[in-house]
Amino acid sequence: MKKGIAAKKALAVAGTALVLLPILFAVATSIYAAAADGEFLFDYLMPLELFPFVLFGGLLLLWAALWARALWPRVAAGLALAALCFFGCQWIAKAGLPASGGSAAGGFAWYAVLFAVALYAAAEIFLGAAGILLAKKLFAGKGKKSNAGG
């Protein structure tokens, strides 16, 4: 019954770390810059730039969740929403914003992209929280499996 539990735990921990890495890195570099320059600057696009980490970590989490039969709907929903927002904000920017950079930021397309970026960050945090819950459930053990994803 305990077959592969160490591998499931490793997948859950590695996936969670990879998913949360872009957010933590953006916050850490902002804090470092604030300490060095005295001005707080937050690069809100950095999590998008590090999307491959989120994608790979999310796939590891999905693998662990499906294997453990626990929390897989949450992990799948978080991963799907993050991917949809990542590609959606690029599509909106390409379709609705001029690529030359000659115009000032504003308008519906600009706010739609900002909304997609914010939704992406929320999906990434949700996916990381689902990973933490999955790892907690796996480390708790005692046969706490759930087919419903609860």
Image (cartoon, rainbow, N blue to C red):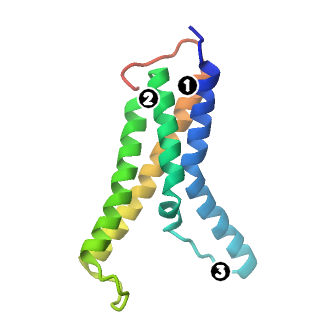
Q: Which residue is mark 1?
A: 137
Q: Which of labels 2 and 3 is toward the front?
A: 2
Q: CA distance from mark 1 to mark 2?
A: 9 Å
Q: Quadrant of the N terminus?
A: top right
Q: Which mark is residue 39?
A: 3
Q: Is residue 31 left or right of residue 56?
A: right
Q: Are marks 2 and 3 in contact (CB under 8 Å)?
A: no
In-front residue for pair 7/32 = 7
Q: Where is residue 36 shown, x and y percent of the image?
A: 75, 77
Give the amino acid type for the residue marked by disc 1 in the picture. Answer: Lys
Give the amino acid type for the residue marked by disc 3 in the picture. Answer: Glu
Q: Which residue is mark 2?
A: 71
In-front residue for pair 10/145 = 10
Q: Which numbered disc, 2 or 3, marks the residue that appears first in the sequence?
A: 3
Give the amino acid type for the residue marked by disc 2 in the picture. Answer: Leu
- Neighbour tally class for label 2: few under 14, some 14-19, many 20 plus, Cα within 10 Å: many
Q: Secondary structure at mark 1?
A: helix
Q: Secondary structure at mark 2?
A: loop
- Neighbour tally class for label 3: few under 14, some 14-19, many 20 plus, Cα within 10 Å: few
Q: Where is residue 38 shown, x and y percent of the image?
A: 70, 80
Residue located at (61% from left, 39% from top):
14
> Does the rendering let one see residue 130?
no
Q: Quadrant of the C terminus?
A: top left
Q: Are marks 1 and 2 in contact (CB under 8 Å)?
A: yes
Q: Quadrant of residue 35?
A: bottom right
